[in-house]
Amino acid sequence: MTHPLGQIRAALFDLDDTLLDRSSAFEATFREFYDSHPSINSTSDWGEALDFFWSLSPHGTINGQDAAVRITERWPSIQHDPAEFEAWFFNTLGRQARPIDGAMEFVEELNEARFPWAVVTNGLKFQMVKLEHSGFGSVVPFAIVSRLFGADKPDPRIYNEAVRRLKISFKGIDDIEPSEILFVGDNPYTDITGAAGVGMKTAWVKVSDEFPDDAPVPDMVIGSVVEFRGLLGLG
């Protein structure tokens, strides 16, 4: 793959809001929660409740146990064990996981072209549920989930592990350098900062109007991973 930045021989992708439509899954999960709790739906309309639920997820992440505590603070009649709520939430979120439009076709084309790629995502074991239910589990060459691996992005160890596995998984790239790998993600502070820190090229999936001033400027800004089809000559 050759693009304006030079030769790119492999790509690594974040999962949520990069390959998966996190927003629709998040809203569907909390809609299920809202509909099953009269103490919420009888006192708050869906729009008001949804605004609160989104407030539990700053910067595109959510701590399930902290969210459970805040829900109880907002609606005291809802009493639940934080650990049980966390398990319910992430399992349900996983069941609701769907690919971003065109993303599945894109990665299938990567596989047909034998182009090296993989997924590197922060999160708990429930990220594997998302991969399974979205269909990506059967097509991704490998996926590194941070809490199963033992280090979260932007820790350089998770990126270095991805390079090691790329070399094992694909023939002909034993000599690949980080500068020949493109990392694609939506989070400036984990995806872009971490990948740039180990020397990878970066592409930011634009999920907000402005890229923050306190993160490394990405090499590319895109609206969707599907935009890479043209760069690969796949479409």
Image (spheres, grey):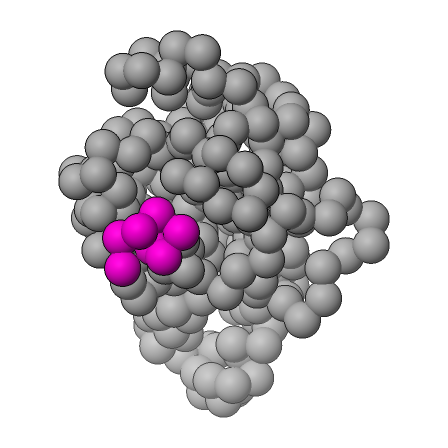
Let me know if residue 187 is in the magenta part: no
Q: Nearer the viewer, residue 175 or 44?
A: 175
| Residue 90 drawn above or below residue 103 | above
Can residue 126 be seen here? The reply is yes
| Residue 19 drawn above or below residue 182 | below
Residue 200 screen position, x and y as percent: 59, 31
Of the 4 image quadrants, the one containing the C terminus is bottom left
In the picture, measured across the screen, residue 91 lies left or right of residue 56, that is left
Residue at the spot x=21%, y=38% of the render? 113
Total number of numbered labels? Answer: 0
Q: Nearer the viewer, residue 119 or 29?
A: 119
Q: Nearer the viewer, residue 79 or 137?
A: 137
Can residue 154 be seen here? The reply is no
| Residue 142 drawn above or below residue 136 | above
Residue at the spot x=23%, y=32% of the render? 114
Residue 190 screen position, x and y as percent: 63, 40
Residue 38 screen position, x and y as percent: 40, 79
Residue at the spot x=17%, y=40% of the render? 112
Of the 4 image quadrants, the one containing the N terminus is top left
Residue at the spot x=72%, y=66% of the render? 210
Residue 223 screen position, x and y as percent: 50, 65
| Residue 144 drawn above or below residue 202 | above
In the picture, measured across the screen, residue 97 lies left or right of residue 46, that is left
Give the residues in magenta.
Answer: 229-235
In the picture, measured across the screen, residue 182 lies left or right of residue 52, that is left
